[in-house]
Structure formats: C-alpha cells, structure tokens
C-alpha cells in the first residue's frame, strides 16, 4: 500500500519512468545495433563497392572503350580521311599506290596517340581484297585466295549497330589472347551492302592499368568479364558457376554473396560498354564480420553502463526539477484558464524565471509566426522539389511540412508540368518573364480547395511544375483548372502554355513517378505542336510501347536521294512523319528517328562528294539541332534534299559539257588514228556505254555518226584545198581502204571523191 502511494506522486513516477525509459532504450539500441550491423553491413560494403566500380567503369569507358569509338569516328566521319584511309573503299588500288603508304602512316599515327591503349587498327577493303594494318602493314590477296577474316566478319550481325565489341576473335587478332576488339562495318546504312570493315584492337594491359589503380584492388580483386575472356587477377580461382552467374546477370548493376575456397565473398558488378561486358569487384568478408562482432559487444557494454548511470541521474534530476515543474504547471493553468494569473505566496528564483518566460511568451510566439509566414514559400519550394525530384521525405516530416502549409495529408498524389511557348516566352523581357511566372503560380494556387490542392514551383527553363494533392482520383477538376490557367496566360500575357498530367498515385513517393510521366508526355509536343494538353492512359501506353519503324524507309529515302527523285523523297518523308504521329511511336523514338534521318542525309552528302557547307546555306544553315516539332524536321530535310539534288544536277551538266568538248577535241586531233568508242572513253576515264549515252544526249547524234561526219568534212576540205592523192587523204582521215572511203564519202555528199574534186576543178575553170 505504501509503495502504491509513492507511485501516485509525481516524483516517484518521474524516477520510475526515467529508469524504465533508459532500460528500454538500452535494450532497443543494443538489439537494433546488432541487427543493423548484421543485416545492413553487407549493403554498406556494396554501396562502397558501387561507388568504386562506377569510378573505375567510368575510367575504363573513357580510357579504353570511348577512345576506341573516337578512333573509329575519326577514321569514318572526318572528311579529310577520304583522300587516304577511306579512299580504297570506293577506288581501285591501281595508279594510287602512294596513298597506301599515306593510309598506313595515318593508322600508325592514330594507334600511337592512344597512349598505349590501341594495339593496332586494321582496314579491310572488300572490293580491292586488301588489308592495311598499323601493325601488320599492307597485304593484297590475289585471285581467289581465301580471306578467312573478311568471311568471318561477313557472318557477323551488324543489323542492330555498326559496332561490335569482341573479346575473342582469332581470325582478326592472329591468335593473340588478352585483347579487346571493336569491329565495325563501313559504311553503315541499313539494308545496304558494306564496302569493308574497320577493326580496332586494344591490349588487355590497358584494362590492367585501370584495374590496378583502384582502391578496391587493395582489399580484394577487380575483374573485367567479357563474353569469353576474364581479365584481371585474384587470389582464389573464380569458380565457373560464379563466372557463369556473373555473365548471365541482366541488370545494369548488382551484387551477390558467394563462397569461394570456403570463405565468404561479396561480388559487385556494373555493366560496361555492352551488356555482355561487366566490371566486377570481389572482396573477402571475413575481416569485416569480425569487426561487426566487436562493435556489437562494445555497444552492449556501453548500454549496461548507461543503464546504471541513468538510474543515478534520474534520481538526482527528478528531485531537482520536481518543485519547479509543479509551480510551472500551476502558473500555466492559471494563465491559460482566465488570463489573470494568481501569484503563489512563496516566491523562489526558479519560479521567477519561469514567470518571466511566460510573460514574454506571447511576444516570441508572434515573432515566430511572422518568421514562419515569411519562410512558407521556401518550405513549399523545398517540399515540392524534393517530392517531384524523388528525394525521400520521412512521413512524420512530410506531415509536419504539410501542416505548416495548412494542408491535410491527402490519399492521392499526382503532378502537372507546364511549358510556355518558346517563341512568345522568349520575346518577353527578363522582368516580364519573372512577372509571368509569379502570377501563373499565384493563379494556380488561388484556385486550391479542400478537395484539390496544387503547389507550383518554377521549373528549369521556361516552365512550371506543380504537385497535386487530391481527396479523389478525379482528373476532371484538375483539367478545368489547367484550362483556366491556359486562358489566363493567353489573355494577360499573350503566351501559350502546354500542360501534361501524370497518373494518380496513392503515396507521396509516387509523386516523382507522376512527374516523370508528365515530363515524358510533354515531349509529345514534338509530334503534336498544336496540342496543349496531354493526359490519360493512351499517352502513357504509347510512351511505354517501345515500337520502332522498319529501317527500310530510311534506305528507300536514301535511294531516292541518290536517284535525284526529290518528289519521291518528299513523299517518303511525309509518310515517315505521318507514321510517327499516328502509329503509336514514343516521342523519344521520334526524335531518335529524326536524328537517324539527318545522319543518313549527311552520309549521302559524303558519298556524292558534297560538302555540307555547300548545301546548308541560307535558310538551311539553321539546322534543327533542337527542333520545336517534327514538321520542322520534315520541312528542313525536304529542302536539304532538294538543294543537294539541284547542286548535283548543275555539277553533272557542267561535267557533261566538259567531257563532250574534250572528246570532240580528241576526235578533231586524231582523225587518222583509231577513234573507237573505247579509245575515247579511256581519254576521259569513263565507261564506254556511259560515254555513248552522254555524247548522244549532249550532241543529238551518236558517237560513230559524229566521227564519220567529222572525217568526211575533213576529207572534203582536203579535196577542196590540196592536191593530195585520194588514197593519202583516206589515210589522213582514218580509212586504210580507199574503196571503203569512197563509199562513205559518196553516202555523205552524193559524189565520189574523184567526182567531187573534178567538179571542184570545173567550177574553178569556169570562174577563170
């Protein structure tokens, strides 16, 4: 009974509560700490490994893989290489032997500037059956001699990409091991036969240098696993089943525990240039686990000491604070009951201090409220930015922040992303832009109700992002608010505003997903520039569809460009644009497809030897690197195709006139020689059949008739102006048979040569 009475007093309850709290806290901390070190220790190691592997993989990509890709790009994209390295893809070796040395020297130069990364660069020219290698020099196969390397490359699948990464290719490396090989076809046009291959080989020592410089290699092993080769060193041999599991991992990164040689190991990996290449870190966990047990025992000892010390301090502190707390409770009760506090008869220093604190409490609370109101925009900015950006906000903190903003936690969350029209927004001054953003957000939040709340913040660039909180997952009120905002912006600022709405989520963490959906949907302005609102499942399904166009349209378009058929090229572009709009392709793929078309067009200019600066002049110089919509791409590509076709026609016409004039001059100077079509074609380096068609189109007569006409006219002149014998004249105009010459002369002028000369003499006698 006496114990029960004592526990009815505040003092003893405080002491008991404090002792119980310390004991429970110590027990909880001990258990939680042990579980923490047991369950989360591996994750901490994994996080550290992921950071290290990310740094090493970035270094590997930069020092090895990206350097090899840049070397390939330097070889195939640089226009200057057309005079040596790329020359033999489309030109014969004959009469160009000097260029072989230039190509070989240039390949050696590219290999030498790679800082020891690239071992060799090999160029395989299929049409010339020739290899030029920075390491192995020059070789040309004779006749039907087999070419295993090219036959093996022809069997590789280059349909998905022009670049293939290999770690085992004996036919390309001459049997050398420990290499990284980049094989690429040239040129890369879908549906077209390539003209050869570029093979770049890097020494595995380049990987070893990167792996050996990592901090992870001091405690474990760093490995690079290719499809068939394992690079790196480790203390224990890696079991085949572990290596197989590593290569079969489909995620970009991850980790798993394995027992190797009877010891636990943590294996963490990240994918490199291709999903078949992985960088892995292998670390023994035995030493780390022993450190975990020591830490757990230390925490238990600290907890036991804290319990004993807490019991002692609880008694002392409870005794010291008991009476001031009682006085404070009485004072607070009197103050907040009727506003007229009653002073107790006994005054102590502690009570006087508390009374002074209470007297000033109202002033401080007022100041605090003013400060809080001033900071509410910052609170809102931080809350919206964190939720839309995917930064975690603890539930208790989230509830507190919403309480500061006067908002009850809602059951449904979403996001809206607004983007202002670029042209009209860019015409505004900086001051007016900020004025527009401020009033736009103010108007958005002024329409908040208990059922639907929108919190807006300025987004990067020319937009506004809004966090949406609702009691019901009903999109209709939100769409009405968006329509009202768009009308407000257009009426007051003459600026259009497009909007996209994410899906409804049942947790605050889902707001980031809704915002990413809204950002993705807003990208469909590229396909539908006149549309101002994007929302609904059909757009999200389109975004996730992953559909792609058949690459044949691009090959057909390039074929039309080569044929100079501009109307067909424009129709193909129109069909392409219509398919992208109406057949459910994602906005990201539409932009990628536009980029592919631009790349194919530039490749076409390279093939027809047109410099981009010749074609892309005037309006076309404004290349749509960041186009507003697909229609701009279509128009630009159509104009560019027409301009290139016109330039090619002009060039072809000028070349035809020059060639025909050169052939005529050759005929005039060599009437006595062999003037066969083949002989004339050799003089202008053209195919005889092509020269015949060109000559007929330019002069209106075929080549043989023109030669005969010129010979007859020369014979006529010689008969009229000289006394040379007819047999000699026949030889001078290319006829070894005088009888055949007389026949052709009579067919041309109706008289034989002797009759023509006799009649000419009669006319001269009559004139005298």
Image: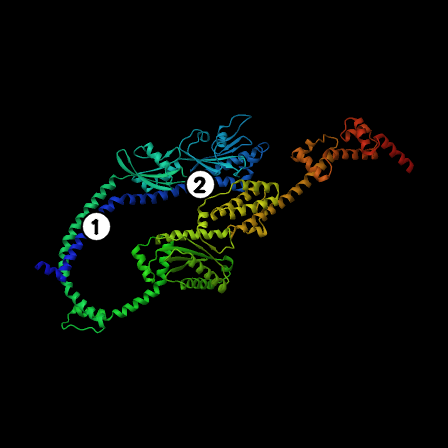
Nearest the eye: 714 or 37: 37
Q: Position of residue 760 (x, y in %)?
A: 87, 34
State the CA–CA distance, disc 2 to disc 1: 52 Å
Nearest the eye: 536 or 342: 536
Picture quadrant where residue 611 is located: top right
Horizontal arrangement in the rendering, residue 520 relative to residue 353 (left or right): right
Query: Callout 1: few (<14), some (14-19), or many (20+) C-alpha neighbours within 10 Å?
Result: some
Decide: is 91 above or below 547.
Answer: above
Horizontal arrangement in the rendering, residue 11 relative to residue 74 (left or right): left
Residue with the mark numbered 1: 29
Q: Position of residue 634 (x, y in %)?
A: 55, 49
From the image, which quarter does the N terminus lie in?
Answer: bottom left
Label 1: state its secondary structure.
helix
Q: Residue furthest left?
A: 2
The dot on residue 124 is: none
Residue with the mark numbered 2: 67
Q: Position of residue 467 (x, y in %)?
A: 39, 57
For the point 51% across and 62% down, the residue is 494
Q: Position of residue 127 (x, y in %)?
A: 56, 32
């Amino acid at each position: 009974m006496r114990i029960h009475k004592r526990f009815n007093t505040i003092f003893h309850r405080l002491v008991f509560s404090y002792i119980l709290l310390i004991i429970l806290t110590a027990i909880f901390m001990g258990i939680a700490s042990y579980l923490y070190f047991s369950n989360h220790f591996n994750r901490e190691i994994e996080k550290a490994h992921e950071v290290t592997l990310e740094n090493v993989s970035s270094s590997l990509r930069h020092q090895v893989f990206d350097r090899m890709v840049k070397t390939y790009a330097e070889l195939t994209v640089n226009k200057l290489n057309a005079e040596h390295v790329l020359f033999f893809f489309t030109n014969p070796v004959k009469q160009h032997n000097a260029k072989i040395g230039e190509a070989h020297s240039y390949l050696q130069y590219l290999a030498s500037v790679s800082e020891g990364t690239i071992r060799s660069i090999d160029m395989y020219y299929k049409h010339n059956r020739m290899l030029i290698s920075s390491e192995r020099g020059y070789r040309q196969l004779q006749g039907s001699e087999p070419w295993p390397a090219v036959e093996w490359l022809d069997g590789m699948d280059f349909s998905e990409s022009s670049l293939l990464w290999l770690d085992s290719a004996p036919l390309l490396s001459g049997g050398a091991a420990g290499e990284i090989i980049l094989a690429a076809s040239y040129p890369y046009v879908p549906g077209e036969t390539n003209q050869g291959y570029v093979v770049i080989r890097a020494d595995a020592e380049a990987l070893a240098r990167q792996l050996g410089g990592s901090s992870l290699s001091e405690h474990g092993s760093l490995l690079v696993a290719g499809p068939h080769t394992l690079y790196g060193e480790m203390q224990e041999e890696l079991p085949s089943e572990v290596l197989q599991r590593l290569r079969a991992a489909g995620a970009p990164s991850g980790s798993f525990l394995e027992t190797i040689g009877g010891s636990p190991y943590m294996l963490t990996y990240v994918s490199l240039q291709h999903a078949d290449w992985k960088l892995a870190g292998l670390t023994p966990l035995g030493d780390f686990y022993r450190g975990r047990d020591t830490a757990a025992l230390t925490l238990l000892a600290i907890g036991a000491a804290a319990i004993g010390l807490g019991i002692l301090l609880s008694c002392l502190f409870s005794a010291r604070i008991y009476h001031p707390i009682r006085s404070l409770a009485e004072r607070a009760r009197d103050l907040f009951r009727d506003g007229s506090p009653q002073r107790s008869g006994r005054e102590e220093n502690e009570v006087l201090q508390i009374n002074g604190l209470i007297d000033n409490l109202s002033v401080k609370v007022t100041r605090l409220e003013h400060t809080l109101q001033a900071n509410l925009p910052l609170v809102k900015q931080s809350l919206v930015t964190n939720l839309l950006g995917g930064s975690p906000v603890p539930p208790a903190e989230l509830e507190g922040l919403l309480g500061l903003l006067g908002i009850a936690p809602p059951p449904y969350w979403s996001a809206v992303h607004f983007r202002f029209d670029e042209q009209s927004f860019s015409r505004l001054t900086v001051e007016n832009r900020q004025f527009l953003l401020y009033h736009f957000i103010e108007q958005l939040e002024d329409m908040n109700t208990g059922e639907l709340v929108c919190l807006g913040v300025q987004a990067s660039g020319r937009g506004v992002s809004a966090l949406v909180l609702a009691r019901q997952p009903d999109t209709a009120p939100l769409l009405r608010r968006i329509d009202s905002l768009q009308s407000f912006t257009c009426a007051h600022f003459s600026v259009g505003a497009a909007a996209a709405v994410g899906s409804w989520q049942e947790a605050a963490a889902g707001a980031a997903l809704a915002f990413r959906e809204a950002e993705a949907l807003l990208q469909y302005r590229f396909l539908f520039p006149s549309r101002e609102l994007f929302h609904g499942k059909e757009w999200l399904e389109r975004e996730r569809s992953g559909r792609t166009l058949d690459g044949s349209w691009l090959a057909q378009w390039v074929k039309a460009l080569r044929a100079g058929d501009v109307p067909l090229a424009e129709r193909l572009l129109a069909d392409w644009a219509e398919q992208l709009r109406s057949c459910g392709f994602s906005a990201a793929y539409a932009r990628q497809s536009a980029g592919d078309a631009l790349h194919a067009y530039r490749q076409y200019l390279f093939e027809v030897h047109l410099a981009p600066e010749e074609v892309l002049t005037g309006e076309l110089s404004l290349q749509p690197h960041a186009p507003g919509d697909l229609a701009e791409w279509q128009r630009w590509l159509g104009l560019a195709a027409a301009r290139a076709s016109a330039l090619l026609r002009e060039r072809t016409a000028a070349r035809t006139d020059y060639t025909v004039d050169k052939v005529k001059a050759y005929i005039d100077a060599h009437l006595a020689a062999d003037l066969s079509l083949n002989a004339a074609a050799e003089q202008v380096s053209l195919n005889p059949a092509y020269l015949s068609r060109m000559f007929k189109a330019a002069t209106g007569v075929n080549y043989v008739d023109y030669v005969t006409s010129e010979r007859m006219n020369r014979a006529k002149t010689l008969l009229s102006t000289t006394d040379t014998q007819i047999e000699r004249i026949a030889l001078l105009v290319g006829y070894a048979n005088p009888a055949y010459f007389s026949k052709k002369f009579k067919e041309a002028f109706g008289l034989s040569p002797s009759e023509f000369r006799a009649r000419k003499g009669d006319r001269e006698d009559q004139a005298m």
